[in-house]
Amino acid sequence: MQVVSPLVEKMTEKRWIRPTQGRQGENLKSVYLPFTTTGIYSVLTGKSIYFQPDSTLTSDKVVITGIEFVDFTTNSTLDTPNGTRTNIAATEATLGYFVLSNSKREIIAQIPLACLILRLNGGRPTFTYWDDFQWENCSIYFSNSAGTSAANGAWFKVFYTTK
Amino acid sequence: MNNLIIKRSQIVEAVINGTPATGVRYYFTDIPNLAANNLRLYGLEGFSSTQLATTPTGYTTVSTTTGIVVTLRDTNKVEFLYQMPFYTTIRANNYGAYTILQPRTINLTDCYVTLTNTAGLSASQSVAFNLYYDLV
């Protein structure tokens, strides 16, 4: 018999907490932002770099259940349709934010990139429950872009379940 | 063991105004969005410069984390989290575990940090957190 406190039961039911085990049954999509010197992917201090529309990551189809940021130590490079890029180091990630928005451009969550790096958090995954979002309104930005260039790119692992 | 699920988050900060001093309450900067009555705060995460170099408002975050404690008060002025070490709220210091709270509505401008040791701290540095909440 498992004894569960009423508080834990309520918080689990509200989807505020969940067991720390792995991500059984969840799907994964890797999303890349290949930085460039000009255009929508150019990195400038304070400039939002938006994700492209994604036919999978739409809130009428899926719930985003987790997100991770892949840094240089985790995987040095990433291959994108725009060519190979070097992943951002953890020190540069402390200057960046991931911003989740909905269709009204309301900011739902704003999380420092470094907090989404799995290896820096004891391997414990970052859980989310985002069922109202507009992926192309989501973005990243850097409070200081000095250490980031067109040779870099950002790699996110987005975990989701279908509705 | 359970860990927190992020539904909504808001970065908040208490700025060290003037020369850092022990015994002084440095109150959190107001975020009107967090004053909603239907808001339930259920977790938080502290940020040092290892996680976040600069806050969205442009303040540099603290790099020394061992001389800071945080107190949170709810809308009934109850100090439901009293002088919790800031170091403990940093997820990376807890093998990835977030600080999970009994859900409640807070009064952010009543919440504050105090310093138990000013070594390594400077004026205009920010003690920053992400607050995790939901609308009910």
Image: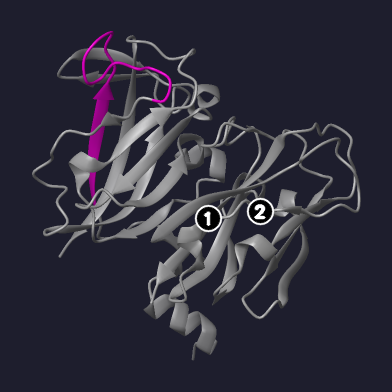
Q: Position of residue A158 (x, y in %)?
A: 28, 45
The subunit carrying tag 1 is B
Foreground residue among A83 and A107: A107
Residue sitting at 91 percent across and 48 percent down? B22
Label 2: how many residues lie within 10 Å, few (<14), some (14-19) or many (20+)? Answer: many
Q: Which mark is residue B66?
A: none
The residue closer to the viewer here, B89 or A134, is A134
* Chain designation of label 2: B
Q: Position of residue B35 (x, y in %)?
A: 51, 67
Residue on which the image places disc 2: B28
The tag on residue B31 is 1
Q: Amino acid at mark 2?
A: Phe
**Residue B105, picture quadrant:** bottom right
Callout 1 amino acid: Ile
| Badge 1 element | loop
Examine the rendered structure and indicate whether residue B22 appears above or below residue A79.
Answer: below
Q: Is B100 positioned to the left or the right of A152 in the image?
A: right
Please provide the residue range marked out in magenta: A27-46
- Asked whether residue A34 is drawn in magenta, I would say yes
Q: Are marks 2 and 1 on the same chain?
A: yes
Which residue is depicted at the point 25% across and 20% down?
A41
The quadrant in which the C terminus of chain A is found is bottom left
Residue at x 28%, y 8% (from the top left corner)? A37
Disc 2 secondary structure class:
loop
Dot 2 and dot 1 residues touching (CB under 8 Å) = yes
Query: Which secondary structure type mostly characterizes the magenta part of the structure?
Result: loop
Residue B46 vs residue B114: left or right?
Answer: left
Residue B18 relative to residue B135: left or right: right
Q: How is the image coloured?
A: one colour
